[in-house]
């Protein structure tokens, strides 16, 4: 079954990997799930780092958009989007087609993720 | 004048001139933005009066066009993190909420197969321009069901050209019936509580009948829920027009 409410990202939320990395795009019989949020509260918003379980492996990722409405003038996406990232902050993929919110620049030092993004909102 | 018979023709009076008073035609269409109308409650009207003064002040400096739910708008905002410090978003207005200075409207668009919604505040000083690209009202006041409709109904070209329109014409109503994705939806739109007329329900008759079980037909006859705003609207419209004339 598909859960409806609490649309920010917490443990065991299914996420959608948005970049063109091999790990994110090869099909697997289980969707990628969040197992830990690197945050004081367990709730992940845009710009937070999370630990993802994909294809039986653990991988860190960055949240680039969620279904929960945030502050006014910020975009709200129809799916929980995530970009795979190494431990040092380098993105795994080489291109991001889906739109990325501008607010991400303020939160954290993810300039490399920004550099590979194509559309901004 | 003599007709072909040789007898004088019956006197035909000249046609009366038809005077089209263009100013009168323009005045007949009045539009008051819904955030000016104060909600029903026990607050002092002085608070709404002061808020209205601030709203009129902002409208004098920055033009907020007349728009309804269902219009396609392009909004440019000032953003410190953007490339040229401005960001432009095009989308269909699905909801207008809030009263007074906190009035908001939500724009929705589908970019690169990803649905994006942004809730803008009408009186936020960060907004630099609001352009109406396409004028059309829809059958409902609230188009939240577009989230569960097929994405083609929410996609609008970012470089769309504004559709031209004459000022005194009525705002056209688009009687489009939208097709939905398969259930489950975020809300049960077939229930009479939402009173949606703009969806083409392809559900079986039994489901539609079962949804009518939740109808509350006594609500429209409830006298305590009546809120007649015509006199208030009149007064406020006059006030706003006086304020914007200067």
Image: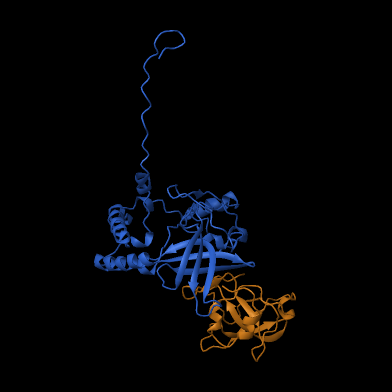
Chain colours: A orange, B blue
| Quarter of the image where one finds residue B66 | bottom left
Total number of numbered discs in the rendering? 0
Q: What residue appears at the point 67 percent right and 84 percent down from the top-left corner?
A: A91
| Quarter of the image where one finds residue A64 | bottom right
Depicted A60 relative to depicted A28: above or below:
below
Please give left or right for residue B61 compared with residue A85 in the image. left
Quarter of the C terminus of chain A within the rendering: bottom right
Q: Nearer the viewer, residue B58 or A76?
A: B58
Query: Most extreme residue toward the top, as rendered?
Result: B6
Please give left or right for residue B112 compared with residue B234 in the image. right
Q: Which of B13 and B208 is in front in this view?
A: B13
Q: Where is residue B2 in the image (x, y as percent from the top left)?
A: 42, 12
Q: Where is residue B198 in the image (x, y as percent from the top left)?
A: 53, 52
Depicted B240 relative to depicted A109: above or below:
above
Depicted B22 relative to depicted A78: above or below:
above
Depicted B86 relative to depicted B172: above or below:
below
Q: Position of residue B146 (x, y in %)?
A: 55, 60
Q: Nearer the viewer, residue B213 or B148?
A: B148
Q: Position of residue A58 (x, y in %)?
A: 68, 86
């Amino acid at each position: 079954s598909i859960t409806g409410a609490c649309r920010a990202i917490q443990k065991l939320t299914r996420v959608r990997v948005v970049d063109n990395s091999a790990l994110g795009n090869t099909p697997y019989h289980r969707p990628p799930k969040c197992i830990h949020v690197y945050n004081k509260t367990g709730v992940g918003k845009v710009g937070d780092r999370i630990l993802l379980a994909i294809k039986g492996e653990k991988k860190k990722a960055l949240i680039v958009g969620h279904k929960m409405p945030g502050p006014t003038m910020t975009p709200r996406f129809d799916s929980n989007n995530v970009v795979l990232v190494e431990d040092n902050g380098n993105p795994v993929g080489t291109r991001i087609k889906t739109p990325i919110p501008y607010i991400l620049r303020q939160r954290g030092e993810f300039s490399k993720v920004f550099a590979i993004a194509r559309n901004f909102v | 004048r003599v007709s072909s018979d040789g007898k004088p023709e019956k006197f035909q009076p000249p046609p009366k001139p038809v005077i089209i008073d263009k100013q009168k035609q323009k005045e007949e269409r009045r539009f008051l933005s819904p955030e000016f109308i104060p909600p029903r409650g026990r607050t002092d009207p002085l608070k709404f009066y002061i808020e209205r003064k601030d709203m009129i002040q902002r409208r004098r400096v920055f033009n907020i066009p007349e728009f309804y739910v269902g219009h396609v708008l392009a909004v440019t905002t000032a953003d410190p993190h953007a490339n040229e410090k401005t960001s432009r978003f095009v989308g269909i207005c699905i909801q207008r909420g809030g009263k007074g200075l906190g009035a908001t409207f939500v724009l929705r668009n589908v970019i690169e197969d990803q649905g994006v919604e942004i809730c803008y505040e009408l009186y936020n000083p960060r907004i630099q321009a609001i352009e109406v690209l396409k004028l059309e009202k829809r059958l409902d006041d609230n188009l939240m069901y577009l989230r569960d409709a097929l994405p083609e109904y929410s996609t609008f070209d970012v470089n769309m050209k504004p559709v031209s329109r004459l000022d005194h014409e009525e705002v056209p109503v688009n009687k489009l019936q939208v097709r939905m994705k398969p259930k489950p939806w975020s809300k049960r739109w077939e229930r009479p509580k939402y009173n949606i007329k703009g969806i083409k329900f392809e559900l079986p008759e039994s489901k539609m009948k079962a949804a009518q079980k939740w109808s509350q037909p006594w609500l429209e006859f409830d006298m305590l829920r009546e809120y007649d705003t015509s006199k208030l609207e009149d007064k406020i419209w006059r006030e706003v027009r006086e304020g914007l004339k200067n």
